[in-house]
Structures are given as structure tokens and as C-alpha cells.
Image: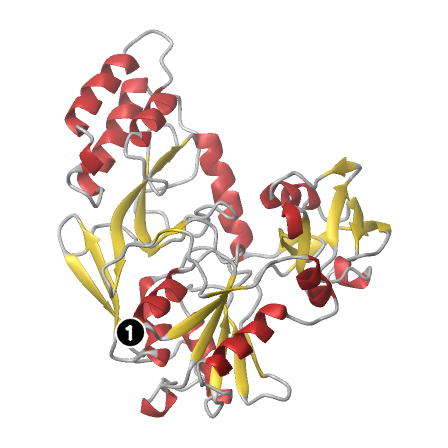
Amino acid sequence: MAPRGKVVLTAVAALAGAMAQALAPGVRAGAPPAPAPEQVVQAAWQAVADHYFDSTYGGVDWQRARATYLRRAAEPGADGYALASEMVALLKDPGTYVLRPQQRAKLDEEERRLRVDVVGIGVLLSAGPGGTPMVRQVLPGGPAQQAGVRQGMLVLEVDGQDVRKLSITQVADRIRGAAGTKVRLVVMAPGGARQALTLTRRAVSSAPQPSGRLLQGENIGYIYLPHFHEGMETAFLAELRKLIRTRALILDLRTSFSGGSLGTLSHIAGLLAEGQALGILTSREEVFPLPAVKAESSSNPLVPAPTAIDAYARPVAVLIDESTTFGILAFALQEMGRAVLVGRPTQPATGDTQQRWELPGGGLIQVTSGRFFSSRGRPLVGPVVPDVTVPMDDEWLRAWYDGSDLDVRRAIQALRQRGAV
């Protein structure tokens, strides 16, 4: 029987964190009175004891941990959330952690931003050469596009502060703000001079849509897949049907949003490798096979449900890099020998499933309740590594700024070398 609660598959990534998972039943907003430290520690311990996928807790004596941290929680001035976090960290599992109420509120806000329009300037950022923030995409109709910002520009300053050493999340937080307020940027095109811009923030759609096209001069299809949430399998199907007669397909998983559902993953894979086993998902109670199967229905009345003729059996290349926050499909297809991976390693990731449970006082604990193993029996722990590496250097940046894509070029070469095209 599947674990209780709403379970989703996540990619734990430094770039985006675990930002798009569903809360387990009973989670609610609010700021209740501060609980006793012992209550927080006990609740966190119980969630792990009941739901952690590994009954050996990675060799940690979980009963002893309970006794130790409850004793410390009873001491004067004890901080229940700090102790619970320290206790959970004994598992050395990045997908299992505790959030204070304030941290939980920030996470809730980040998840809300994924579902609604964001007040900002209409760009998606990622790390460029040397880690400098780079404009990865310019969203149509936003202030950035209207001001002449182009993909491949480097972001050097925000409101007078040098941001070259900040994380992408920190830079994005500084660019966002209230609608109607202004933000000052200093950007630079590859090999160009600095350019100062003042933009007025406003609501911009923050959710890129999947898009497909036939590559010019090649009988090769290209599909950008931004996430794996429910309904994406239907959008992918609609794009794939336009390209079903191509000699090969390039699937772009770069600049993707974290999180997704197992069903969506299985249904998308079912269009590329129907009948094959993606792997298994292990929980405390059971082992769940994860097959590649087409969906039986469609979430869009304008897109009929998939049939046998929608199966794509020709060669596939998958683009990944540090902006890929959901690499499990790429990993599974690579392990099956179904696709060649091109680009750069992803952020450290796992193919785990997590559940979230509310803690006394309004915080939460996330617990790894399942672990994915590929068809070859390997877990997804750490970066997904491409078969063909394309360095993100000045040549890559210049091409990206000019509207070209060296990753796509190398993917075409890789497909040719394998006799695919």
C-alpha cells in the first residue's frame, strides 16, 4: 500500500531547492503559539520513525536519538526547532529536513510564485561562466524585453549592489518587488560594455510553456519541457505529434522548475520508451515498479488521448545542465540506453519522494519516504552527468546571446555519430 499523504517526486537541487512539492494532509497556514521544545522534537522524531523509507535510518540509532534530544529539549532555554533540525541531520539525507515557521512561510511564498504571475521584470536567470548571473530566458511582453534585455546578458549589479558572487536565488529576490516600483540593473553583453537600465516591475507570467519545433535544415525535432507537473504529459504529447515523423528528437530539460508527479514522468516516458521499466521506487513497506506507459486519457479536450501511433521510437538526445532541477527522466533514459545526454552536469539531485508534515508551532518537516532506483539498480544521488559535455565558456555565452545554442549543435553531432541521423 502506498504511503499516506500526498507524495510527489522531487529533485533536491541547490539552484532551486525543494520548491514544488505538495503538503501532506493537515498542513495549514497560520502562526500558532510557540510550542514546548519537547513537542517539536517528538513530532519530528515521530514523522521520521513512521515514514522514513529506510527502516535502518542509515545506521542511526533512532530510539537513542529520541532520548538524547528530548533530554536536551527539557533544558532551560532549549530551542526545539534547532534541536529537531540537528536530530534529523543525523540521517545525512538532504531530502529530509526541518523548517521553522518563518522558513515555512518563505517556502509557501516561493511555491505560490510558481503558480501565479510574479512581480518582476520577466527574466529567468541561471549561472553563467564563472558563476556570474546570466539571463537564461527573456519572457515575452515583460519589462526586460521592452528594455532590450537579451538572453546571454550577464547581470552585474542590482540597485547598486554587485551581485556576481551571489546565488541565483539571492539575485532573483533582489530583482523582484512591488508592482510599480523601479529596479536598477547593470548588465553586460558578451564582450560588450556595461549597460545601466532602470525597469519598472510588474506582474509577468512566470511559468514557461512547453514548445516544439523542427530544427532548421534538419529533420530533427526539438521540444522544451519546463516541468513535470500534472497535465504536462498532454502538452508534451501535443508537441510530439507535430514532430512524430522526424528522424530524431532533442528533448530540452534545461531551465526547468523543480518537482513533479510520478504519473506525469511515467506518461512522458511512455511516449518515448513504452513498455520498458524506468526503475523501481522503494518505500518502507513496498517496492513499486515504475513503468513507462502512455496516459489513458488527456487533460486537454483539444488533445486526444495517446494511441499506438504516438509512440516515438527514433533516437533521442536530452539536454541538461545546472539549471535542470528535475533530472530523473534524463537519468532514467540514460540508464535504459534510450537517450544520449548532452550539456553539463545537473545540480546535485535525488530521485526520492518526500512527504511533508506540520510541526507544532507552524513549521514543517519533510521526510524522504521513497527512493528511486534505475532499471540498472542504481539510485539517483548526486548530479546527473551527460554523455557529451559542452563547456559553458565564452564561446557558449556568445552563441547564446546571438540566438544560437551550442548544446543543440553538439546534440545533433552526437546523434550523427551514433548513426541516428
**310 displayed left or right of 147:** left
**275 displayed left or right of 21:** left
| Residue 125 location (% of width, % of height) | 64, 53
Between 321 and 211, the residue placed more toward the observer is: 321
User: Quarter-wise, where is residue 140 in the image?
Assistant: bottom right
From this view, report whether residue 296 is shown above or below residue 364: below
Residue drawn at x 32%, y 78% as measured from the top left: 273
Q: Residues within 10 Å of mark 1 (few under 14, many from 20)?
A: many
User: Quarter-wise, where is residue 260 in the image?
Assistant: bottom left
User: Which SS class for mark 1?
Assistant: loop
Between 54 and 211, the residue placed more toward the observer is: 54
User: Quarter-wise, where is residue 80 in the image?
Assistant: top left
Q: Quadrant of the N terminus?
A: bottom left
| Residue 410 location (% of width, % of height) | 56, 72
Residue drawn at x 42%, y 60% as measured from the top left: 327
**150 displayed left or right of 386:** right
| Residue 110 location (% of width, % of height) | 52, 46
Tell me if I can see residue 300 in this picture: no
| Residue 230 location (% of width, % of height) | 40, 66
Tell me if I can see residue 322 in this picture: yes
Q: Residue furthest front?
A: 417
User: What amino acid is labelled 1 in the image?
Assistant: Ala
Residue drawn at x 71%, y 71% as measured from the top left: 403
From this view, report whether residue 216 is shown above or below residue 34: below
Q: Which residue is mark 1?
A: 292
Q: How many marks?
A: 1
From this view, report whether residue 74 is shown above or below residue 98: above
Which coloring applies here?
secondary structure
Residue drawn at x 15%, y 26% as measured from the top left: 63
